[in-house]
Amino acid sequence: MNEYKILFLGDVVGRPGRQAVAKHLPDMIRQHKPLFTIVNGENAASGVGITPEIADDLFKWGADAITLGNHAFRKKDIYPYLDSKRPIVRPANLPSSGVPGRGLCRVSKGGIDLAVINLCGRVYMDGYDDPFRCIDGMLDELQTEHVFIDFHGEATSEKAAFGFYVDGRATCVVGTHTHVPTADEHVMAGGTAYITDVGMCGPSPSVIGMDKDIILGRFLTSMPAKFEVAAEPGVISAVVVSVQKETGRAASIQRIRLNV
């Protein structure tokens, strides 16, 4: 065949998200037969951050690479793990090089060398360097046409602009962070698959994965409250991207939502 597939799962949120992934990811891999499976795990530990044990579980359940986001460093025990050789990436556009981990990793299977990149947006998110300038330098140094980018950002406008900016230079750009899936998946003119936000693998009904009663109380009273992951069963939000082997350009992108 002249194509291969990438399966990507949106932000895994807490125990319900992990349980949904553990139960359904193996079946999804058997059904869609992806060459690469990538999971965003930045909310996997109690809704904020990730631990080495959870990262190991995600790999055991079928992930070939894990991407993170603005909560990458919330659990300190993940720091040495980020510096290991495991294929897990935190945002590349941090203002200092003296932080754990890296923003790019490579996974190779079936004769394809896939670069996996994680970036954070700057709109409504402080502490990050310009992702547009950052990606220019990274793409200039890569020796592969097969590039997967997880753009972890709040603003839809910034994500859409970034998609246009790298169109034709990356295989796909998937948006994460808002936990709400968008219905704009498409292949851009230059052959880059794009979606503004894949959504989450987390509890439903909830407010972006958090207990709805706590969130409603916060809105109604303006009183501070500790957010907690909802206890309801998890849903799976994902995309499958078909990629041309010779060019690294996307042929199609399909949105998936499984109600568990």
Image (tube, helix red, strand yellow):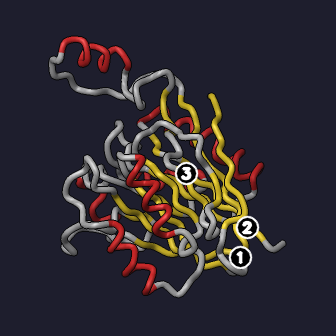
Mark 3 and mark 2 lie on one chain; the one further toward the N terminus is 2
> Percent x, y for residue 156?
42, 47
Residue at 65 percent of width and 78 percent of height? 112
Residue type, numbered disc 3: Ile
The residue labelled by disc 2 is 4
Q: Is residue 103 above or below residue 234?
A: below
Q: Is residue 137 visible?
A: yes
Q: How crowded is the residue under tag 3: few (<14 C-alpha within 10 Å), some, or many (20+)?
A: many
Q: Is residue 18 visible?
A: no
> Percent x, y for residue 161?
43, 59
The residue labelled by disc 1 is 110
User: Relative to 223, is 148 on the left or the right?
Assistant: right
Residue type, numbered disc 2: Tyr
The numbered disc on residue 195 is: 3
* Dots 2, 1 in contact, CB < 8 A: yes
Q: Using the image as rendered, state which of residue 73 and residue 60 is in the foreground.
A: 73
Residue at 59 percent of width and 80 percent of height? 145
Q: Is residue 209 above or below residue 238?
A: above
User: For the residues marked 3 and 1, what is the alpha-carbon distance in whole angstroms?
Assistant: 26 Å
| View extreme (left): residue | 223
Q: Is residue 85 above or below residue 122?
A: below
Secondary structure of the residue carrying tag 2 is: strand
Q: How crowded is the residue under tag 2: few (<14 C-alpha within 10 Å), some, or many (20+)?
A: some
Mark 3 and mark 1 lie on one chain; the one further toward the N terminus is 1
Residue at 48 percent of width and 36 percent of height? 180
- Nearer the camera: disc 3 or disc 1: 3
Residue at 52 percent of width and 55 percent of height? 174
| Image quadrant occupied by the C terminus | top right
> Percent x, y for residue 175?
47, 52
User: For the residues marked 3 and 2, what is the alpha-carbon distance in whole angstroms?
Assistant: 19 Å
The numbered disc on residue 243 is: none
Residue type, numbered disc 1: Gly
